[in-house]
Amino acid sequence: MRAPAMIVLSGLALAAAACATVESSPVTTPPTNSVGAPAPVVGHDWFYHLDGDAARLVYGLAESDDMRLGLDCDRASGRLVLSAAGGPDAQSWIHIEAGGESERFPARSEPSELHDGVFLTAVAATDAPVFQRFRSVGWLALWQDGELQAYAPHPESAPDIEKFFTFCG
């Protein structure tokens, strides 16, 4: 009878030791992807428009003037015109990033007719690393008023990103 009692007491001692509070550093597992993909936002999406020899890829709210970021090009031009709204204190560039790539494009600024602030336009090459990364990861983010705004497509519109860049060259 003595041996089973010792086993039970040993088990209780081990359980108590396991429950004791001990200062330790948290265990962290490195993420498999250092830049997580943002989730799509209900109502907002990437919209692809083709009009003859011109194409447009816009992130915003469907059927509205709520455009967060626009990309325009002519067929096989290899050149994009970026458009974005900026606050009253907006800088003179459009700063975007995708999956760890980040670039600032010098922008022209003009007063916005839709909101308090400015409307920014910039020119960029379709083969800029940030756009190649956008094609790869499927989302693009815009730095606006000191905050990063991530723009992810819904599954049904995700293929339009590649269609747009294939068209633009």
Image (cartoon, rainbow, N blue to C red):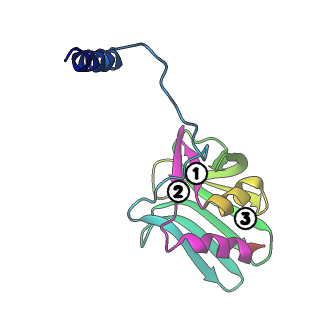
Q: Is residue 31 above or below residue 46?
A: above
Residue at left 70%, top 63%?
81
Callout 1: 10 Å neighbours few (<14), some, many (20+)?
Answer: many
Residue at left 50%, top 28%?
27
Q: Is the C-beta separation of discs 2 and 3 under 8 Å?
A: no
Q: For mark 2, give the secondary structure.
A: strand
Q: Residue 135 at what x, y percent from top left? A: 67, 63
Name the residue tied to disc 3. 80
Front one among 73 and 25: 25
Would residue 88 be found to the left or right of residue 120 on screen?
Answer: left
Q: Is the C-beta separation of discs 1 and 2 under 8 Å?
A: yes
First in sequence, mark 1 or 3: give its number: 3
Q: Amino acid at mark 3?
A: Leu
Q: Amino acid at mark 1?
A: Ala
Specify whether residue 161 is painted magenta.
Answer: yes
Q: Is the C-beta separation of discs 1 and 3 under 8 Å?
A: no
First in sequence, mark 1 or 2: give its number: 1
Name the residue tied to disc 2. 151
Q: Quadrant of the N terminus?
A: top left
Q: For mark 3, give the secondary structure.
A: strand
Specify whether residue 94 is painted magenta.
Answer: no
> Where does the magenta region start and end?
138-166
* Distance from Cα at disc 2 to Cα at disc 3: 18 Å
Name the residue tied to disc 1. 141
Q: Is residue 117 above or below residue 83?
A: above
Which mark lies nearer to you, 2 or 3? 2
